Image: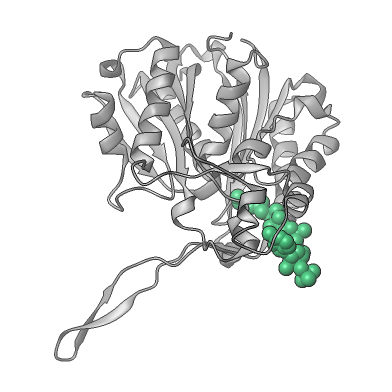
Amino acid sequence: MRGIRLCGSGAAVPATRVSNVALSQRVETSDEWIRSRTGIGERRVAAAEENLTGLATSAGQQALQNAGWAASSVDLILLATSSPDDLFGSAPKVQAALGAKHAVAFDLTAACSGFLFALVTAAQYLRCGAMQRVLVIGADQLSSWVDWSDRRTCVLFGDGAGAVAVEATSSQNDALVGFRMASDGSRGENLTLSQHAERQELLPGISAQQGGFTTIAMNGQEVYKFAAREVPAILQQLLDDTGTSASQLDWLLLHQANQRILDAVGDRFGMAAEKVLSNLAHYGNTSAATIPLMLHEAVSDGRIKSGDLIASSGFGAGLSWGAALIRWDGPTS
Ligand code: UT7
């Protein structure tokens, strides 16, 4: 068995900012309500000429550049997204746009846990020796899928992409110190973006379903309770698995859904507030993108340094959740 090394990161967000104050012109809400309940101040929204593939490609390109990799050296591109431009998958379009001509590329759908699940998946290909270099991208454009008249959900989400270049290394230097993943479909109805099928008569006596999708529907309180319970539990299990104490952690890098969740988990592990990474104020919940977007920001501004130990957790629709203990080993500013 080999190990993995995180070599470089990248991120991309649309240029258009929508502030809480601006949103309050559309739905009955306020900057005060949104900030105090979630920590969100503004979010980015893709313009007509932007799309998921473009955001994912820009983030991927930057990660390749920061890792010093040629696109042609990548073996696999894993695109974690729940909002592809094409239901058949957007990863191959990213592969083509990057010029990663030797890479196989496919999408992985696990909502807000998507990046973490994709990173763990990438590690399996690398550890077993099947591949040498993987580009893991988390990207979502949920602005296309929220109901902009539903104040309970539309204030929460934004668009963005983040990426990490990951390569195989020796097992002694494995940057994925441990991981755990979980799913519970029996609670899945609490957060959905489900299909609505319209029946159409195909032939006499035979009907087919014309597909389409509804908008995001969430039972916020139930999802909040789920996250507040499961995230600390899975992180604790991971610390126990790996014989790590919370005091050894340099950073807590959680899915950015709600500042109250970040604060509660940080308190639970006795982490100082500045060690609990947060950029919710600027981007809101970008689903599969939150973790790599935050990682890239903290690496770029010099907070995360080579050798730092990071406890990360993703959680969301499915329901799905997971945790990973990772050591950053890429370039730092
Ligand atoms: O990425 C996947 C993971 N997602 C999450 O982790 C999200 C988890 N859930 C949450 O973060 C929180 O539940 C929310 C931020 C979504 C909601 O906060 P809350 O404190 O649970 O509020 P609530 O749903 O209990 O609503 C409280 C009140 C309600 O009014 P009444 O019934 O008390 O009169 C809502 O109608 O706030 C009202 N409300 C709003 N008011 C102003 C709901 N949304 C808004 C809004 N602006 N945008």
Task: Inspect this view and state whether residue 223 appears.
Answer: no
Where residue 116 appears, as percent x and y from the top left, is: 54, 37
Give the residue furthest to the bottom: 205
Say which residue appears at 70% left-offset and 29% top-offset: 277
* Residue 311, image x, y percentages: 68, 29
Ligand 1, by image quadrant, is bottom right
Which residue is rendered at x = 82% and y = 33% of the image? 269
Q: Is residue 96 left or right of residue 147?
A: left
Q: Please tell me whether residue 215 is drawn above or below residue 57 in the rendered image.
A: below
Q: Position of residue 44 (x, y in %)?
A: 53, 41
Q: Residue at x 65, y 16 (%)?
A: 304
| Residue for point 70% across, 46% down | 258
Residue nearest the viewer, comparing 158 with 193? 158
Relative horizontal placement of residue 158, taking residue 225 as reference (left or right):
left
Q: Is residue 103 visible?
A: yes
For residue 176, above or below residue 85: above
Q: Quadrant of residue 222?
A: bottom right
